[in-house]
Amino acid sequence: MNKSLSAQETKRYSLVIWKILIGGIALFAIFISMIGLGLFGALPSFRDIEHPKSNQASEIIAEDGRPLGTYFVQNRSNVTYKEISENVINGLIATEDTRFKEHSGIDFKRTFTIIGYNLIGKKQGASTITQQLAKNLFPRESNLNFFSLVLTKFKEWIVAVKLERNYTKEEIITMYLNTVDFGNQAYGIKSAARVYFNTTPDKLTLTQAATLVGMQKGITMYSPTRHPERSRDRRNTVMAMMVKSELLTQQEFDEQKEKPLNLHFNAATVNDGIAPYFRSVLKNDIKNIFQEQSITKPDGTPYDLDRDGLKIYTTLNYDMQVYAEEAQKEYMKVLQAQFIASWKGRNPFKDKALQIEQGIKRSDRYKSLKLEGKSEDEIKDDFNTKTEMTIFTWKGNIDTVMKPIDSVRYYKMLLRNAMMTMDPTNGHVKAWVGGINYEHFKYDQVKMGTRQVGSTAKPFTYAVAIENGYSPCYTVPNVPVTIDGYGEPWTPRNSGKPLPGSITLQKALAYSQNYVTAYLMKQVGPVAVSTLATKMGIPNVPAFPSICLGTFDSSVYNMVGAYGAFANKGTYTKPIYLLRIEDKNGVVLFSQKEIPKPIMSEEVAYVMTRMLKGVVTNGTGSRLNYKYKVNAPIGAKTGTTQNNSDGWFMAITPQLVTGIWTGCEDRAFHFISTNQGEGANTALPIFAGFIKRVYANPALKISHADFEAPKSGVSITYDCNQYQQQEEGATELDEKLGF
């Protein structure tokens, strides 16, 4: 028989229980205080809480505000609360923390409830959104033992409370969504929206938002790419919880639950976005600017483009960049097929052993084997042993098995291409295509690479001649010319059969006649031409007669800048593509503006635009009109170098200047015939595809207006009928005067 406790015993036991309870609370308080004081390891400082560190991607931004791409270690870009769809906010609160707006960082009611659930085997999490944010901002160490894990959990409690004291609820939920991992290199809601649905956070629909929120229960388990059915079920669970929290009606849930995921998945890599070559060059430029100008963070440490969330504002036009890339891809497929067909029945590698050997030694495979300590014989054996590899084709990447030496030969026969477009009035670069595929060929051919320019250099000599009083209508016998006084006598040959008889300078430029160009060089001298080229932004042009035919090397970048002076009334403006750089708080770190430099008279520049228009109306660039139906006031010059190694097309309009180059990586590999290898066939069609797209988009405001004549008039006669009358009149006067 159980004996009941006496009143005295009850009092004594109650006192003991209260002592234990109070003592436990006191010890817990002391324990928490000791954690707060950092006795069990340092806690984030007040400054850390105010300015939490996270790997935030730097954004490269086009002139209209659209992102071109990012630099990142973690693909993370922050957004504000107003830029996040209400569907995301509601879904997150309903799923992760229903009392988010009520608690102060720790939901004790939920914590003790969860303990009960876990005791009966129903495992649930008790962390609030604020606690999860603390974990995201100040990550745990891996492989913690039980005591360390418990200690870390209490630390997160303290950090959560501090976060609640320093930030509003809106700021906390925004920070959480900016820091959370969504898998597939998508960090933060902005990246996740783009990677999974190709949209922005503010435009996420109910189902899209619920899908992303649902992933937080398990990034891999509920991945919409790996486990779509499981992800869909979890999405519906999230929406059901929104109904339970009265953040969604039952009717809305019933309407949405049967919808498919409708992913628009595009995995994030550092190569994502448009203009990858441009972004690569830009990144290197910014590093140099920061170093040269000693631009550092407030604490004196250097900026990290991959982690510090900079905003990089550029001049590139998003649509034009897309058009340039599309035009290149569209035509290079065709041109590559032409190139391979042209060598049918012939061996393109005959007498090319040196070039193949150089290609081997420049390859990543060779360099890697060298680092491994392999001998030349071992490397030779490796390059002659079949292995699995992925190669680039215009139909997409192909996984194949081949000898590495055969892959070297394959890539030697692959045509490369580069293109740049600029606004001549301010030097702002609008489009930049540095190569055919950045994944496989990372060398930028717009600015970093240089090639022989061929006949695209001829306008420099003509400009000097016009400056010295020659009219485009001046007639010259189209016969060989020898120039002495600069080493060995130089007598250039004409490319193809020359036009017979005497021809005007206008016609000579239109049909790219070498003899007439050499005649002009003999009259004006190479120093004057070299000086002008230098003023036009082309360095290292030697003062030799042969420069009139473009024997020197230049980049597409510099050639576009040079031609810009013709289109911009004689004023040269160095191409610029970086406007300003801001830190993640909007503080301007660097900015620049164009610097125009008058280098020739407006009159001469205008006459040159007339002459360059003649190339298109009835010269080597005429297929732009008759074949591609581009009918607009466009000046241009084709260029083809020795052995058809390089094909160029330079085009000018009052609003745009474009330069295009095409050729193989190695000049020893080229088209056999000039008909196929000339710039009119290898480069001009890409411009046609580009400019037609540009003209078709009225939002770009690129007009068909002609070049504007100088307001002061033009004293140089460019109307050849008028010029002929003047010449006949002068002859009659000479006869009357007895000359």
Image (tube, rainbow, N blue to C red):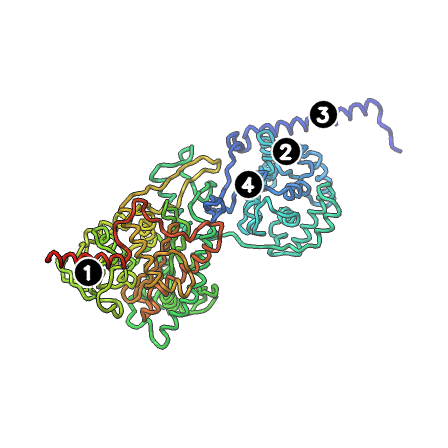
Closest to the camera, between mark 1 and mark 3, is 1
Q: Amino acid at mark 4?
A: Val
Pointer 4 with pointer 3, Cβ within 8 A: no
Looking at the rendered structure, the secondary structure element under dot 4 is: loop
Residue position for label 3: 19
Pointer 2 with pointer 4, Cβ within 8 A: no
Tell me which label, 4 or 3, sits earlier in the chain: 3
Expressed as whole percent of the image width and height from the top left, the position of residue 252 reads 72, 47
Residue position for label 2: 105
Tell me which label, 3 or 2, sits earlier in the chain: 3
Looking at the rendered structure, the secondary structure element under dot 2 is: loop
Expressed as whole percent of the image width and height from the top left, the position of residue 86 reads 64, 41
Closest to the camera, between mark 3 and mark 2, is 2
- Count residues near mark 1 (Cα–Cα under 10 Å), then give few for <14, some for 14-19, many for 20+: many
Query: Is residue 706 placed above or below 617 in the rendered structure?
Result: above
Query: Is residue 215 placed above or below 547 in the rendered structure?
Result: above
Expressed as whole percent of the image width and height from the top left, the position of residue 353 reads 29, 69
Q: Residue at x 64, y 54 (%)?
A: 261
Looking at the rendered structure, the secondary structure element under dot 1 is: helix
Q: Residue at x 20, y 51 (%)?
A: 528
Residue position for label 1: 519
Quadrant housing the N terminus:
top right
Q: Amino acid at mark 3?
A: Lys
Q: Amino acid at mark 1?
A: Tyr
Distance of mark 4 from mark 3, alpha carbons? 51 Å
- Count residues near mark 4 (Cα–Cα under 10 Å), then give few for <14, some for 14-19, many for 20+: some
Closest to the camera, between mark 2 and mark 4, is 4
- Count residues near mark 2 (Cα–Cα under 10 Å), then give few for <14, some for 14-19, many for 20+: many
